[in-house]
Amino acid sequence: MKLMSEKDIAQSIKEKLSQIEERENVRIIYACESGSRAWGFASPDSDYDVRFIFVRPAQDYLRVKELPDFIDAELNEIYDINGWDLKKFFKQLFKSNPVIFEWANSPIVYKTSDDWEKVKALMNDYVCKRSMIHHYLGLAKSTMRKSLTGETVTYKKYFYILRAVLAASWVFYNESPAPTEYAKLVSAEKERLSQGLDDFAEKSFEELLNDLHKKKSSASEKASGKRNLSLENFIDIQMAILAGESSDLEKQVFTWKKLDELFQSIVQAGVNECDRREGSIFNGRN
């Protein structure tokens, strides 16, 4: 079988998104790549993690029995495609879930819209440093607990752990959501963190990450190697520092008003669009 080019894959994904809209009777306002490809350290056999945000017809939000707030569209060796209802997305935004900020700032976008630009413009009003830092540190701890149990470790697990710690550091010191791209996190943090790593390893922080990146990008997703205890000790210390320094941060208190207003506006925009177009996907079919 002939391997598809990146351009062909992107076109295939866009076609699949159109098919999802038709099949599920929804309107996709945004779709992007997430995970390792968006972060910038995909392996040759990494799949395509596509995430999309959709809006249902207005009448679907008035049902007694609520419809699912997610769509699992496809999962196989090549594609992992699923999406969230805009209402679910807004509930996570209210919690300042950093994952959706990563989606919003993905360098690989398959579909966007004017409605999405309105959503994105609102997102920074729901940034809680404390929640974001706790999320990333919790993710790093969980991955370490599950993955660092034997004498070897898959390279991608070190990347997941390092990226989470770097993202937590970014949020604390830059007071903003962490960028999606791993290279940006490394570039911003390498000078500060290199000083701490000197006490634990012969190689500099940047050299160590470059070595890991080379191994990860040239090997399969399951490729593994001997554990680096110096790196793990360094990670433990960085996590302890961040946990201590962020412990006194206050949890931001948000209101639902802006989210309610924008959600209602976007759903109504779909109704108006339906009125203007014959045969729209928002044609009220059951």
Image (cartoon, rainbow, N blue to C red):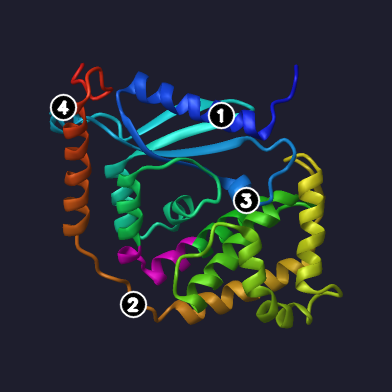
**Which residue bears the numbered disc 3?**
146
Measuring from the top left, give residue 86's x and y in whole percent. 30, 42
Q: Earlier in the sequence, mark 3 or mark 4?
A: 3
The amino acid marked with disc number 3 is Lys
Q: CA distance from mark 4 to mark 2?
A: 46 Å
Q: Amino acid at mark 4?
A: Asp
Q: Is residue 119 left or right of residue 140?
A: left
Say whether disc 2 or disc 3 marks the residue closer to the N-terminus.
3
Q: Residue at x 36, y 68 (%)?
A: 128
Q: Nearer the viewer, residue 176 or 64?
A: 176
Q: Which residue is mark 2?
A: 250
Q: Residues within 10 Å of mark 4 (few under 14, many from 20)?
A: few
Please give the residue where the numbered disc 4 appears in the rendered image.
275
Q: CA distance from mark 2 to mark 3?
A: 30 Å
Disc 1 residue type (three-letter): Gln
Q: Are the two marked residues, 3 and 4, in contact with CB atoms closer than 8 angstroms?
A: no
- For badge 2, the amino acid type reads Glu
Span colored in magenta: 124-135
In the rendered structure, the answer to whether residue 158 lies left or right of residue 92 reads right
